[in-house]
Amino acid sequence: MPDDRPVRISVDNVTKVFKVPHERSNSLKQTLLNFRKQGFETFKVLDDVSFKVYQGEFFGILGRNGSGKSTLLKLLAGIYVPSEGSITVNGNLTPFIELGVGFNPELSGRENVFLNGAILGLTTKEIEQKYDEIVEFAELERFMDQKLKNYSSGMLVRLAFSIAIQAHNAVLLVDEVLAVGDERFQNKCLKVFADIKKDPSKTVIFVSHDMGSVQRFCDRAMVVHDGELTYIGDADQAAFEYKKLNFPESVFARNTAQEVPFELRITNAAGRETNLFKFNDKVQIHITWKPDDRIKNAGVALFKDDGQYIFGTNTIIDKKPIKQGESIIYEVTARLGTAHYLVQAALFGQDDNDRIYSVYDGPTFSVAAPAEWQGVTYLDHEWRM
C-alpha cells in the first residue's frame, strides 16, 4: 500500500565496501619497501540495500553485531559515503550515534554544553534558555564546572543526550549507544522517545537489540543480516524474523520428526487466516485431522518465542470430549503482552498419558498490547478501598 507522507530518507541500491591492507607499515621505510607488494582485502559490509522512511515514522533497524546496521547508520549520518548507490535525506538530521563527538575534554561541562549545542545548530540564546533543563535532565548539577576529562562514560552520555534532544532537527538517528546509561537514565530516554513518537513532524531511525523497545515504539522495522536486507515491514514480524535468524533455538522447540496427520490453522473470530492480533482480539486455533478411532481428546499450549510457557489446556481438563468426525476450534482471547507466540498441539486417547500425535513446531502469531502496560498477560482485577 503506497504511503502518501513525505519521504524523509531514501536509500537506493546502497553498497558499502571497505578495503583492509594485508600488511601494516609502521614506518616510512617499511611503507616504501612494502609499496609494490602491498595488497588489500575487500569486505562488503552492505550489499544493494534499498528502503524508504516517511515523515512521522519511528523506523527500526535490527541486526546482530557485524551485520552492517551501524555502518548503515553512519552512511545515513554522512560519516561514510556509499561505494555504490545513493542516500537522500530530506531535512536536518541529529545523529545519536557517537554521542559526545565534538566534546573538548579540557573544557568544563558548562562550556561543552555551549560548544556541542552550537555544533547541533542551536543559537547561544537557545542554549542559555535550555541550559537548566539540559543539566537537570543529565543529573549533573554538581559537576558542570568540572573538566570533561574527569567525567565517567555514563556522565558523558547523559550530558550529550541531554544536549542532543534540544536540537530542532526533523530526523533523529538513534544507536545502541544509549545502552551505556544506567537503567534510570534509559527509562528517561524512553520517555523522551514516547514524546517524540507523538510528534508527526519527527522521524526516528532506531537501532536496538531490545526487541521490546522496537515493538513498543517502531511503526515499521527492517532486519539486516550479513549486509543484506532480509525483511522490512511490521515491527512485530521484524522482531520475530530477527530472532529466527539469530536465535533459532529459542524461537520454538523442534523435537518431533514424525509426520503428523493433522494440521493447525490460526484465524481471527471471523474465520480469516492471520497471524497479527491486537490486545483483546479473539484468536481461533483450528485443529483438523484424518479419521482415527483412537483419537478421543485434543490439547493446545501457547509459548512465547523465547520458549516461555504461557498456558495450556485440553479437552480432558475442560470436559469437552471429541466426537468422531469432528474438527476442533480452540478460541482464546489475546489478553497477552506484546510478543510473538507459538502454538503447540497434541491428540490423545482417553487420557493425556495416551498421546497419539504432537505438533511442536506449530504456527505462530503476534499480539500488539497497549503501550501503557508491559507483562506476559493481563489479569482481571479490581481495586477495593
Image (cartoon, rainbow, N blue to C red):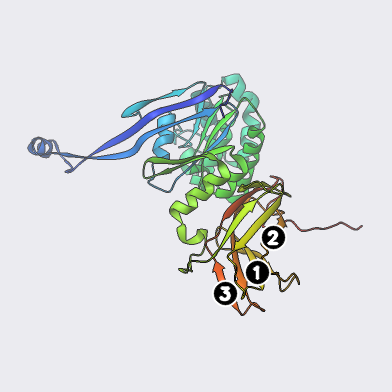
> Label 1's element?
strand
First-in-chain label (3 vs 2):
2
Say which quadrant the C terminus sits in: bottom right
Pointer 2 residue: 330
Residue that appears at 50% across and 60% down: 250
Q: Can residue 71 be spotted in the picture?
A: yes
Q: From the viewer's perspective, is residue 30 above or below residue 312?
A: above
Determine whether, in the image, residue 24 is placed left or right of residue 17.
Answer: left
Q: Nearer the viewer, residue 187 or 65?
A: 65
Q: Identify residue type, mark 1.
A: Ala
Is disc 2 surrounded by few (<14), some (14 to 19) or many (20+) residues within 10 Å? some
Q: Position of residue 54 (x, y in %)?
A: 55, 27
Residue that appears at 47% across and 33% down: 107
Pointer 3 residue: 356
Pointer 1 residue: 298
First-in-chain label (3 vs 1):
1
Q: Nearer the viewer, residue 214 or 30?
A: 214
User: Is there CB contact under 8 Å for labels 3 and 2?
Assistant: no
Is disc 3 surrounded by few (<14), some (14 to 19) or many (20+) residues within 10 Å? some
User: Is there CB contact under 8 Å for labels 2 and 1?
Assistant: yes
Say which quadrant the N terminus sits in: top right
- Spatial separation of the CA atoms under disc 3 and disc 2: 19 Å
Residue that appears at 62% across and 49% down: 184
**Among the 4 quarters of the image, the one containing residue 311:** bottom right
Determine whether, in the image, residue 252 is placed left or right of residue 11.
Answer: right
> Label 3's element?
strand
**Among the 4 quarters of the image, the one containing residue 44:** top left
User: Is there CB contact under 8 Å for labels 3 and 1?
Assistant: no
Q: Position of residue 114 (x, y in %)?
A: 54, 26
Q: From the viewer's perspective, is residue 129 above or below residue 342?
A: above
